[in-house]
Amino acid sequence: MLSLLAAMGTGGVIAILVVVVVLLIASISVLFFARYKKCPSDKVMVIYGKIAKEKDGTQNSSKCIHGGAAFIVPMIQSYAFLDLTPISISVDLKNALSRQNIRIDVPSRFTVGISTEPAVMQNAAERLLGLKLNEIQELAKDIIFGQLRLVIATMNIEEINTDRDKFLDAISRNVEGELKKIGLRLINVNMTDISDESGYIEALGKEAASRAINEAKISVAEADKHGSIGEAQAQRDERINVSQAESEAIAGENKAKADIAEAQARLREKQAEAMRIAVAAEKIQAAKALEDAYAAEQEAEKARAEKEKATQEADVIVKVEIDKRKKELEAEAEAEQMRRKARGEAEAIYAKMEAEARGVQAMLNAQATGIKKIVEAANGDAANAVRLMVADKLEEIVAKQVEAIKNIKIDKVTVWDSGTNADGKTGTSNFLSGMMKSLPPLTEMFDMAGLTLPEFIKPNAVPKAEEVPAEKVKE
């Protein structure tokens, strides 16, 4: 290691130290920022673990912060949050015993929340940290039930029913004092209708209502009496004042009518003069307007005539051009159709002829191949190859020979054999020999082909008449 440092020199060692210091500072900065926690405004941050003593020497189990931020020492301290969300608690107290031993029902709703006072926050950190909102709600509900019963036991029904402010103030003092012990504060109390089993509160209400109704009736009667007297005096004064006002009004009306008539006369005079001037001006303007209208109408008629003339000329020219163009297009279309038709027919004929040529060529190729194989089968001897081909066609040749006589109808043949003729042959043998000679000369055909007919079908192989038994010659 020392040799490595010596090799690096002083500059290398300093560079390594700088890198190490920078990495150390960066690690400390990351650790610091990771453990520097900020507290939201709707929460209380509780720091627990190793907590420093207060200035007065008090050692607390935790430190509470509402707002702001704090550094959490790693491995020594940790933190958690208390939610400041208000908690609404429905308290339906039934059969609570009052000071008069009358049981009443007090339905109410309390709104509580974790307090932000330093001392009360410390209580909340010690007793509520880690609890859920519903668990805090149940704990506060039990406290509210007990304190509400205690307050009702110290008050009369009349005080509870009529002096609600006093009742609510007593509840707030008692309940909030107990809630602070666990770190909560009372935000609001809302009481609804209070009732009892015996109907005492309802009777008090009816009594108060009856008293108020009677007092209201007395007040109405007194008001009616004063109203009747005042009404009579007011009617008298009204009549006097009305008479005076009417006389003054009539005098004023007469004077006003005279002034109005004079003003109307002057107005009609002014209106007549203005009417005369206006009528004269209107007639002058009307005459000028008619003159301008006649001139404008003449110009409009000229322009309309020129427009119609131009329109008619344009219609004729456009129509002629359209017809001409239409005929040209039709001629071009017809010529193109004829060209396509001729081209199609020529292509069809060419394709047909080409197909036929391919067929003939294929047939000739097949025949040439067949003949070549026949010659090979005849060991290259052309004569033997021809004989093989004729032998192959022999069946067709015989069929043609048979075809020549198959339509001859011989219903009945009678042979009168009178014995031996001068040439030594019988009549029957001559008949059979004549029939055989009627066949085409197969012998010559086979000789030309280089073939030899079997002996039993040669013309000279017909048996003699005397060799045919007489019993086989039948009618």
Image (cartoon, rainbow, N blue to C red):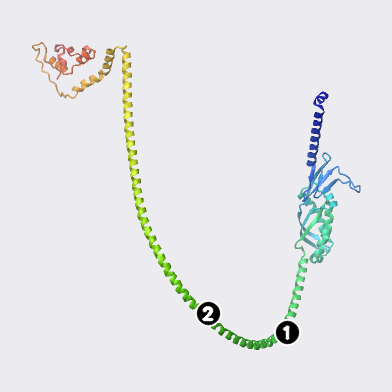
Labels 1 and 2: the sequence-earlier one? 1
Q: Of 417 and 278, which appears nearest the observer?
A: 278
Answer whether residue 130 is visible to the viewer in this image. Answer: no
Badge 1 density bin: few <14, some 14–19, many ≥20, Cα 10 Å: few
* Above or below: residue 473 compared with residue 47: above
Vertical comparison of 52 with 153: above or below: above
| Above or below, comparing residue 70 to residue 456 in the picture | below
- Return the residue at label 2: 274
Question: Could you tell me residue 453's position as x and y percent?
Answer: 22, 13
What residue type is disc 1 on? Ile
Quarter of the image with the C terminus is top left
Residue 50 pos. (x, y %): 86, 42
Q: Residue furthest left?
A: 422
Q: Position of residue 462 (x, y in %)?
A: 17, 13
Mark 1 or mark 2: which is in front?
2
Q: Which residue is mark 1?
A: 229
Amino acid type at image mark 2: Ala
